[in-house]
Each structure stands twice: as C-alpha cells, then as structure tokens.
Amino acid sequence: MAVEQEMADVHPPEAEDISELLPETDCKKCGYTSCSEFAEAVLEEETNPHKCPDLDGEFADILAAIVELNKDPIPYNLMMEQVPCELIEINSPDKDSPLLITCNFQETVRIMKEILESTSTEAFLLPTHTHGYSVDNAVHEKMFKAMEIWKAIKDNSVEARVERTTMIIPGLAESERNSIRQLTRWEVLVGPISGFLLPLFILNNK
C-alpha cells in the first residue's frame, strides 16, 4: 500500500487578503456584487484583476502574475534543507530597493525568488540562519532571532547596499518585530502573512 506523502502549507493568499487590498467600494463595475466576491473570482482565475476599474495597472499586473504562481504544498521530506545566508539580488535592485528578511530553508528561498522574479519586483532578499526551519516553524522554535538577522546584515555589508535602514520581515514573524528593531536599530516593517502578496505590499509602501 502506498504511503501518503505529508505536505507543508506554503500560506497561499486567501480571498479576504486580496479583498483588503482592493478599493472595497463594491461598485459592481467588475461584474461582481462585492469586492470580496471579485477577489474570490480572481483567486479562482474566473476573472482578471484588470476588470476592476479602480485598480492601478501595475497593481493589477502584479496580482495577475501572483494568481498564476504554483502554490502547491511542500513535501515534508524537503524540510530543514538549508541555503547560505548570503544576500540575493532580485531583478537588479538599486539602493532604493527594499531589504526582505527570510529564513534559510531552501524551499522558502526558492519560492520567494520565484514570486519576486515573476512579478518583476526589485529587491534584496536576505536568508538568515534558522537551522533550515521555515519561517513559521522558526518562530515557533525560537529560531527566528534578531541576532541572526543582525549578523547576516553585517556579514553581507547590507548597509552599504541600501539607502534606507528599513527591512521587511514576514508577517508570520510579527512577534519578533520589537526585538529585531531594538537590536539592529533598523526600521522594521511587517509584511503580509502570505509571502505571495509581498510584491503588492512593496508596491503599496513605495
């Protein structure tokens, strides 16, 4: 008898997450009765984000690219595989591009690179040492540490690469925001729970 492979969730966006980013006017011009219904249809690929007349074109383009991304769960047998804690340049970033903090689990880094590259988002992605734990597990196991983030910033000379000392941490790591800010003296923004929505978060915070 075949053994069913256990899978780990990758936190895909939900309709409620998308709805919160929409104008929420419920104008019905898109053909749906509410923005939340439209968001559900977008995620189900039943309609296109460009059907919302109040959405910025770039925002709609990014949302359309996000919807098309693979959001399949990750097999547990890949868990704990690590990547080096080295700064990754995505889409030729410049000094004004954001610094994104993540874990050093290889699948998380792979997915984040795919999200950013497919949405043409310019950014610096910095994996920090979490012993290969994904972000949610690293936070639970107290492995998403301010000291490791500070060390990665220093080891990669990040301060010489960016104009502003501002970082974006995963929404799943919000509980660590104050300790990271106190130790690093950087401004710390908390991104969305779903990493798939990070490009839209960056766009809205330009």
Image: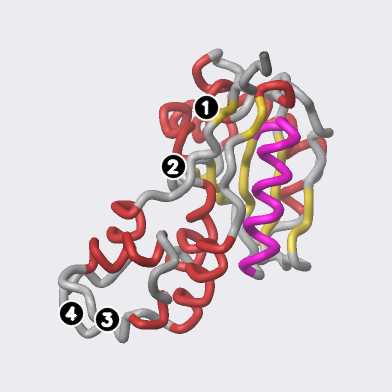
Question: Which element carries disc 2, helix, strand or loop?
Answer: loop
Amino acid at the residue labelled 1: Asp
Label 2 Cα neighbours within 10 Å, binned few <14 / some 14-19 / many ≥20: some
Judging by the rendered image, the residue that carries numbered circle 1 is 136
The quadrant in which residue 1 appears is top right
Judging by the rendered image, the residue that carries numbered circle 2 is 193
The label number, if any, that marks residue 66 in the structure image:
none
Disc 1 vs disc 3: which is toward the camera? 3
In the picture as drawn, the residue positioned furthest to the front comes out as 1
Label 3 Cα neighbours within 10 Å, binned few <14 / some 14-19 / many ≥20: some
Viewer can see residue 168: yes
* Image: 58 above or below 166: below
Decide whether residue 116 is among the magenta residues. yes
Between marks 4 and 1, how big is the CA–CA gap?
Answer: 37 Å
Question: Which element carries disc 1, helix, strand or loop?
Answer: helix
The label number, if any, that marks residue 30 in the structure image:
3
The quadrant in which residue 30 appears is bottom left
Disc 4 vs disc 1: which is toward the camera? 4
Q: Residue 137 vs residue 192: left or right?
A: right
Viewer-nearest residue: 19 or 67: 67
Disc 3 vs disc 2: which is toward the camera? 3
Viewer-nearest residue: 180 or 34: 34
Q: Earlier in the sequence, mark 2 or mark 1?
A: 1
Question: Which element carries disc 4, helix, strand or loop?
Answer: loop
The label number, if any, that marks residue 28 in the structure image:
4
Q: Residue 169 vs residue 192: left or right?
A: right
Where residue 92 sits: x, y (%)? 78, 67
Cβ–Cβ below 8 Å for labels 3 and 4? yes
The kind of secondary structure the magenta stretch mainly shows is helix
Amino acid at the residue labelled 3: Cys
Q: Which residues are magenta?
A: 103-119
